[in-house]
Every structure is written in C-alpha cells, then in structure tokens.
Image: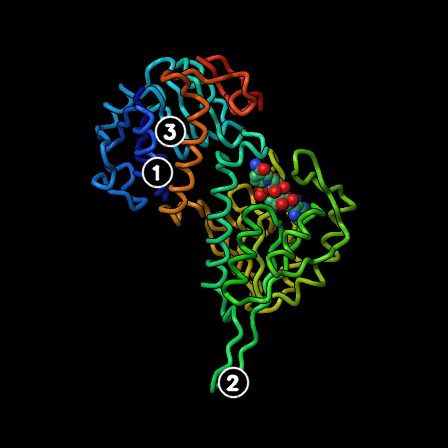
Amino acid sequence: ITVSALRETAAGERRVAITPEVAKKLRGKGLRVLLEQDAGRAAGFPDASYADVEFGSVAEVLAQADLLACVLPPDDTALTGLREGVVVVGQLRPHGAASRVSTLSQKKLTAFALELLPRTTRAQAMDVLSSQAAVAGYRAMLIAAENAPKFFPMLTTAAGTIRPSRVLVIGAGVAGLQAIATARRLGAQIEGYDVRPETREQVESLGAKFLELGVSAAGSGGYARELTQEERAAQQQALAELLKAFDAVVTTAAVPGRAAPKILTTAMVEGMKPGALIVDLAADSGGNCELTRPGERVEHGGVTILGPLSLAAGAPLHASEMYARNIYNFAELLVRDGALRPDFDDELVAKSCVTRNGEVLFNA
Ligand code: NAD
C-alpha cells in the first residue's frame, strides 16, 4: 500500500499531512510512503528529514497513491488525477461543497473528512478539530499580546509599576482553553466565558476567573446550541457592561454546522476602552464580532478588531506533528491485515465517510 501526501497549495498553508515521525511509523507497518517533493518543507521538514521515504512529482504521487492524506481538500485537478478506489483522508470540508463531493463520487473515491468524527473519547487521538484548535487558540492569544498597546504581565520597574492587562476569552472550547492557558503564561489577568455550564470548572482549573452572564445553552454531543433571541439579548446586555473593563478580548465561539454566533455588536465595541483589542478566531466562519472582516484589521472608534485566518497554519511544525499523528491513528482503522479495508462497522469510519467507492454517504 502506498501512502502519500502532496505539498499543500492553499494560500498561506504551510502544514503537511505526513511528517518524518509519522512516515517512519507507516514504514514500520510495512507501508510504502511516497510524497511530493518538498511536501513538508514549509512546515520545517525538508525532504532530507524523511528517512526511507520516496519522493516524486504531483503526477507520480497521484498515479501511485492508494491512500492520500491531506491537510486541506485537494483541488479538483488533484482529485481527478487519482485512480478509482483510492482513499482520501483529511479535512475535506464537505459542508456546502457539493462540487467537491460530486468529484469524489464521480472518481469513485473513498473519502474521509476527519472533521465529521464524533467527539468521543476513542476519537480523541484522531480529532483534527481539537489538535488544530489548540494551535489556533495559542496563536490567537499571541496575536492579541503582540498587537495590544499594553504589556500583558504586571511589571515592577524603576519607571513605575505596570498593571497587568485584563483579557477575556469568549468561548471556552479547545481553542478558548488554550488561549486562556497562553494568556496566563503571559501574565495577563484572564477571564473566560462560555454558554456550556461545564466549562466553568475547566476555565477555573487554568487559574482564570469564569465570567458569569446567566445564560446557559448546552446542546447535544457536548456542543453548545444556538441561543434564542431572548438569550442572545440577555447575553449582550450583561456583556456590554462588563466589556468596558477589558484590554483584550479573544473570541472563539462556534456552533457546529452554523455560521459563528454574533456576540459582540458594534455598539458593544463602541463602549470598549480606547486601545482595546479584539482577536476574532471565528473569522473563518463569519466572526463573533459584527465588525470583523476576515483576514483584515479593522479600527473602529479606537478599538482594533483582528480576524486572522488559518491560524493553525501559522505554527506549521507543531500543527503538522499533531495533525499527522491524527492521520496515522485514523489510518490504523483503515489498514487491516496489510490491506486497505476500512471497517465500516466502526462508527468512527462510518460517520466520517463522505464517499465510499463513489457512493455519497455524507448528507449535509
Ligand atoms: P467549538 O469550536 O464548536 O466552539 C467553541 C466554544 O464556543 C464552545 O465551547 C461553545 O460552547 C462556545 N459557544 C458557542 N456559542 C456560544 C455563545 N453564544 N456564547 C459563548 N460561547 C459559545 O467547540 P470545540 O472546542 O470543538 O469543543 C466542543 C465540545 O466538544 C467541548 O465540550 C469539548 O470539550 C468537546 N470535545 C470533545 C472531544 C473528544 O472527547 N473527542 C474532543 C474535543 C472537544
């Protein structure tokens, strides 16, 4: 079996789906690894850092791959270059991507979108949403610290004492908790908020204060549900007043399958301190702030709103290491007795499958 990865081609993308460490583990399983030349270079893994791996052109990889691992969906040309029956694994973003699903189907490919994995304990080792969200949360807080006009930590100097910044994280999922942990390490005075009541303990266990707004909206599968009109109004009213005290706000709130909830309104931003900063990690899916423009820097009444995109790609070495381990752990479910035979009785395989030999199993 030949396991392959191409060099990612999306703008700004520097991660790679197969790292030297994972290539070695695949080889240990008796699999052949064939990568596109320079596949890992932007992530910090030049070809020479891979032992016992073959390299080839895009055409060679597409012609020989039995399993193609990717970070982001390969473009249509790559997909149509694969042979029938090939298995594709990665973040395939099937929601709202009818034409990609149709290409996978027409080419009779078997495709697994790892973002569809159920968030169960067993799936944790292959949970790309979690591994990449942790990177994004870390990076978002560094961007906040870098762009803030203030220090994050308290400093006692001969030139006087500097008070620590007050930082708020809205949405305490995987990214939010990592952002909180990062702000703590930077010495900020940090608070966290989420609509899922169980996050209070998680926020507090990181040494942060939980911001109580009196709105609770636990949904199914451990996720938040969308707020009702009234809940949203209550949340905004409580938050508007409290926001005035913060120097930086990092927002990470998401509801699966929906656009990000708009939590920070223009009026709320206008009530914030001059010099305050918002880093909207949900910019990719529309943003948590009404003023966010994805990928841009917005100045509004003295407040800066940043909507950085592809945050995980900005720390490509560790992001790739975690991602590739996720891929490896999932691939273990696909390769049985030395053959590529996914076990469709396994819910992790069945639920993440977009197409099976061309048959569309994903329903948006
Ligand atoms: P996510 O990225 O979908 O959302 C981020 C956070 O935003 C969530 O904590 C959510 O509650 C919060 N949120 C949504 N709407 C909000 C609103 N209006 N106001 C404030 N906050 C709002 O979440 P995620 O990080 O992917 O994690 C979701 C859940 O899955 C968590 O319970 C997490 O612990 C769980 N999880 C389980 C596993 C596993 O066991 N395999 C792995 C990762 C995450």
**Residue behind mark 3:** 69
Residue 261 visible in the picture: no
Q: Left or right? Give the position of 57 relative to 207.
A: left
- For the rendered model, the colour scheme is rainbow
At label 3, counting other C-alpha atoms closer than 10 Å, the crowd grade (few under 14, some 14-19, many 20 or more) is many
Q: Is residue 70 above or below residue 204?
A: above
Q: Nearest the camera: 39 or 47?
A: 47
Q: Left or right? Give the position of 177 relative to 333.
A: right
Residue 347 is tagged as none
Secondary element at image label 2? strand
Furthest-bottom residue in this view? 158
Cβ of mark 3 under 8 A from ligand 1: no
Calculate the distance from the C-alpha at mark 2 to the C-alpha at mark 3: 54 Å
- Tell me which corner region of the image, top left, top right, bottom left or bottom right, holds residue 1: top left
Residue 17 visible in the picture: yes
Ligand 1 quadrant in view: top right
At 60% from the left and 51% from the top, the residue drawn is 289
**Residue behind mark 1:** 16
Is there CB contact under 8 Å for labels 2 and 1? no
At label 2, counting other C-alpha atoms closer than 10 Å, the crowd grade (few under 14, some 14-19, many 20 or more) is few
Q: Amino acid at mark 2?
A: Gly
- Residue 169 x/y as whole percent: 60, 56
- Residue 273 x/y as whole percent: 61, 68
Q: Amino acid at mark 1?
A: Val
The answer to which of marks 2 and 3 sits earlier in the sequence is 3
- Residue 191 x/y as whole percent: 63, 60
Q: Is residue 250 above or below residue 129?
A: below
Calculate the distance from the C-alpha at mark 3 to the C-alpha at mark 1: 9 Å
At 58% from the left and 35% from the top, the residue drawn is 121
Q: Left or right? Give the position of 179 relative to 243.
A: left
Secondary element at image label 3? strand
Q: Amino acid at mark 3?
A: Ala
